[in-house]
Amino acid sequence: MRRMSRILPTVFTSILAAGIASGALAQELRRLHPEDPVYRQHQALLEDYHAARARNMKLPPLSILYYAPREEDTLFSIAARLTIPYDTIATLNRLSRPKIPEGPLMIPTQPGLFLYDDPETDLERKIAGRLQAESTFRQLHIPADDQTARSQESVRFYPGTAFSSAERTRFLRVVFMDPLPGGMVSSRYGYRRHPMWGTSVFHRGIDISAPFGTPVLSAAPGVVTEIRRDPQLGLSVHMDHREEYSTVYAHLQEAMVSVGDRVEAGRQIGAVGSTGFSTGPHLHFEILRDGKNRDPEPYIR
């Protein structure tokens, strides 16, 4: 995926609607603070936009500044300091998740959604499907990733538009498939009384009951990193996914993948069993982010 935030500062330029004379070069936001004159300029242009919207007047030209994030910055802190919605910054810079990539970010002077004419990610395609019948947009052009001002990409700007709830959910977290469709959650994430020992222990995933041999599916595209047999989890498949996530599928009757396999979401990777410490046929399923366990249920679509 092309990342507009990797464009060199020398090719940043104001985005101008058709008919607006060019020549106003993009400026650098050095500090997100009123002491920075460019920050004050950004806020003044933003106020002009809101005033025009409130009076139902023609919107002022849209300009783009750029900002090199500091170590302590996040997408949300930047958006809050600029009083610009985070989804505006995300769509302009073609971000599909909240993590800020290396390089400067493009910062617009108006809120709304940016949609490139060549949607590349599921999020961009979802937005394109929702807005395809919307006629209130500006057709704009920005420098492409080859770092020359002569090469440009076409983008539509929808002023005042925001993520839908589904788009927001997709952007804010990774969504996983149900690894055992039709199964029943028999034990949830968190502290519980262990079914065999009777003591209070922390359950690092969820248990999903299903008959022996029921297909277990990969919850997301990924790579098989380990197939393990141990007294606790029995036969288990471990996978790595994009965006620092990994999953574990345990108590399997059999594994149908090998270490190093690249698998798509929905592919069968094993069958329900009762290996290891288990009281009956079920799948123990874990989701980890950066090596730390998360409650799987909010992530499962």
Image: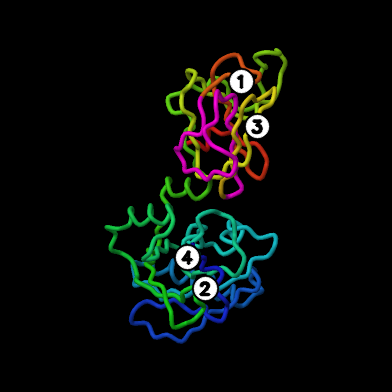
Circle 2 sits on which residue? 44
Q: Earlier in the sequence, mark 3 or mark 2?
A: 2
Crowding around mark 3 (Cα neighbors within 10 Å: few <14, some 14 to 19, many 20+) is: few
Is disc 1 placed on a helix, strand or loop?
Answer: loop
- The residue lying at 53 percent from left, 36 percent from top is 257
C-beta proximity under 8 Å, tags 4 and 1? no
Q: Give the mark nearest the N terminus, 4 or 2.
A: 2
On screen, residue 16 versus residue 7, left or right, reads: left
Could you tell which of marks 1 and 2 lies nearer the N-terminus? 2
First of labels 3, 4 by sequence position:
4
Q: Identify the residue under disc 1.
A: 275
Q: Indicate which disc residue 228 carries.
A: 3
What stretch of residues is rendered in magenta?
Answer: 243-271
**Can you give x and y, in whole percent of width and height, for residue 152 in the image?**
42, 77
Q: What amino acid is found at the position of numbered circle 3 in the picture?
A: Arg
Q: Compared with residue 187, is residue 176 higher up or lower down, i.e. above or below?
A: below
